[in-house]
Amino acid sequence: MTSHGDTSELSGLLAELERLGEKNDAAEDRRAFRYLNITRDTGEFLAVMIRSAGVKHILEVGTSNGYSTLWLASALPEDGHVTTLEVADHKVQQAADNFRRANLAHRITLLQTDASAYLGQSEDQFDLVFLDADRSSYAVMADRIIDRVRPGGLLICDNAISHASEMAPFVRCITQSGEFTVVTVPVGKGEFVACRSR
Ligand SMILES: C[S@@+](CC[C@H](N)C(=O)[O-])C[C@H]1O[C@@H](n2cnc3c(N)ncnc32)[C@H](O)[C@@H]1O
């Protein structure tokens, strides 16, 4: 893996979080206490998208313990930034620790908030919006999500294949908006990729 961050520290931390996620999620019955991280190849895919599209400003919905955020932040140029949203208190604490350990905290704003509250208040637009949270709420928030993607920017959603039926109403909203060119990519759990018209 190549990175704009400290490569050896970051690689070690990503590998540690992958082992932790696998072990924890296999043993944990309570969904709120599973990490549910993206797969490594999804992280690699996101890094390629960020670098090839010249992405600088990212909004992530669903931080968990910060595994995916580390992929996003480490693919950014020095002046890039990720804003990431997480409702669960215990996950926010763990994510903040992981961002410090990776020396990437300066590139990340971690907000403990419900996405719908944030999307209702913010008028910021991003080069990339990455969704990996409560899939059933995406369609309700579709207009607010679309507004956060700048013209020419990207929207990427995890679980497009693993949970295709849950994602279908949102995918329909995006497709029928007429604002996006879309594709589903068979990487990890399936990535729905939508590029907003300029
Ligand atoms: C699949 S996990 C995210 C995994 C993370 N992206 C990763 O790969 O490391 C989903 C997370 O979204 C959070 N979440 C669910 N609904 C949310 C909402 N409406 N606003 C903010 N966070 C939410 C959950 O608490 C959970 O930690």
Image (cartoon, rainbow, N blue to C red):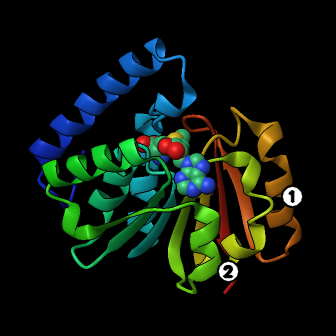
Residue 153 lies left or right of residue 37; in this view the side is right
Report the mark closest to the observer, 2 or 1.
Answer: 2
Tag 1 or tag 2, which sits nearer the N-term? 2
Above or below, comparing residue 144 to residue 40 in the picture = below
- Number of other residues with Cα within 10 Å of mark 2, as a class: few under 14, some 14 to 19, many 20 or more: some
The picture quadrant where one finds residue 116 is bottom right
Residue farthest to the front, as pictured: 89
Q: Position of residue 198 (x, y in %)?
A: 66, 87
Q: Position of residue 125 (x, y in %)?
A: 54, 83
Residue 181 visible? yes
Q: Name the residue: 61% across, 73% down.
A: 119
Q: Which residue is mark 2?
A: 147
> Does the beta carbon of the residue at mark 2 sit less than 8 Å from ligand 1?
no
Q: Name the residue: 26% across, 72% down.
A: 77
Above or below, comparing residue 26 to residue 15 in the picture = above
Q: Quadrant of the N terminus?
A: top left
Above or below, comparing residue 22 to residue 77 in the picture = above
The picture quadrant where one finds residue 94 is top left
Under mark 2, the amino acid is Asp
Residue farthest to the top, as pictured: 27
The mark found on residue 100 in the picture is: none
Nearer-the-camera pick, 126 or 116:
116
Under mark 1, the amino acid is Arg
Q: Name the residue: 22% across, 55% down.
A: 3
- Number of other residues with Cα within 10 Å of mark 1, as a class: few under 14, some 14 to 19, many 20 or more: few
Residue 55 visible? no
Q: Which residue is mark 1?
A: 172
Q: Callout 2: helix, strand or loop? A: helix
